[in-house]
Image (tube, grey):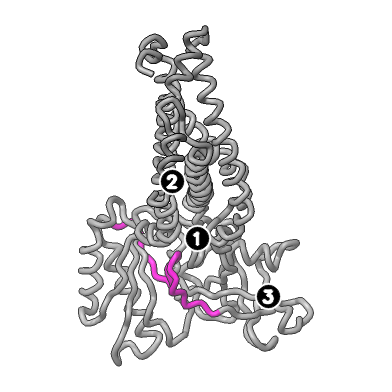
Amino acid sequence: AAQVDLQDAMKAAGATQSGSRGAMRLRQALVVIELVTSVTLLLGTALLARSFLKLSSVPLGFEPTKLITLRFNLRGRPYASSSAQINYYRDVLARIKQLSAVRSASVASDVPLDEAQPWSELRFQIGGRPPAPLAEQPRANTKLVSAGYFGTLGIPLKRGRLFSPFDTPGASHPVIVNEALVRQVFAHEGPIGKQIVFGHPGNAPWTIIGVVGTVRGSHLAAEPPALIYDCLCQSQSPFLTELALFVRTKSNPHQAIHDVEAQIFSVDHSQPLSDVRTMEERLAISLAPQRFHLTLIGFFAGIALILSALGTYGVLSYLVARRRREIGIRLAIGAQPPHIVGMIVRESCVLIAVSLFIGLSISWAFRHYLQSLLYGIPTSDAVSFVAAPLTLAVTALIASAVPARQAARMDPITTLRDE
């Protein structure tokens, strides 16, 4: 601005002109930049929003409502043996089930949707099949659960049966597998009655007695893992000190947390509890990263949309004001108001079309950078690539319609007299 030639500027910006061609192109370029930025951010917002909705509606494999979760951390010499640990959990479950607000309770070695999963993926062989090389053996995670675990979480039984009080340590060692493992290992045969052997082929086999639905693992966006459920009633592992508790309540779970903790401390007040949350809170935490990305880019997209609308309106209003003489002459020689509106809107449509072409081209070229943030939809999602430019086009047209209507309402006599 400090380097503008005063004489040229005064000639170019007279009262009867809209400014020099360079100044006109600069204003149009600024509007195009605003619109390109808007369509790029709007497209990113549309993709993230559809991904978030897809992730929010993904089947969990269990019922998260009215479910309290917490973790034990047994310490001390009294709980050095697995039998003492199991007796502690049995006492805790028996006391909690006596509460009027509790529908059911159980324990397990981990919590769904929790990143801290103590799983150890193990390779195994199927009894009755020829021994397979180690690299070709199927893999699965093992999970220790109490007998009522599936009922407490609402995990459906698909085939066979669940654990019962009659399942005690013995030669058969009954286990339950999920559908992910069945698809991986028993795609063309029934899994019930099949035996799983870990390690050396001569080791004691585990017998499959049931198949349950697949539950999401540590991340909602990750494929559910293949799981083998082992019953706490027949476990002899000495590493049972950090199990998780699940309590299904009849009403608001927050109101029952204090009573549940009191029953646990009545068994042994010296043992600490940690990570006390409802399952719905865990679900919200699992969705937090996607919600943050959506909120952030949506905030900037909203600002960009407002700025582009204001920019379009401001530039067109300025150009209409500088073209008062031209518009007055057009109206004086017979132009109708709809013709004036159409003329101005057509000029804005050219800017919108150029902006959408550039913005969509940039978005298409860099769309793969969003792939890591999306779930369940491609980066070339047709709905997003239609909704984002359509939203921007409608907003820009509305912004351009206001100065167009103002121009059409001009009184040609008054305008020409003023000019």
- Disc 2 residue type (three-letter): Asp
CA neighbours of label 3 inside 10 A, class few (<14), some (14 to 19), many (20+): some
CA neighbours of label 2 inside 10 A, class few (<14), some (14 to 19), many (20+): few
Q: Is residue 161 visible?
A: no
Instruction: Check residue 311 in the rendering and tell me which mark sits there, or answer none.
Output: none
Residue carrying label 2: 5
Which quadrant, please, contains the C terminus? top left
Residue 266 percent location from the top left of the image: 20, 74
Q: Main secondary structure of the magenta part?
A: loop
Decide whether residue 43 is among the magenta residues.
no
Residue carrying label 3: 138
Residue 17 percent location from the top left of the image: 46, 28
Q: Which residues are magenta?
A: 102-120
* Residue at screen point 25% across, 72% down: 264
In the rendered structure, the answer to whether residue 305 lies left or right of residue 179 reads: left
| Residue positioned most to the bottom | 77
Residue carrying label 1: 220
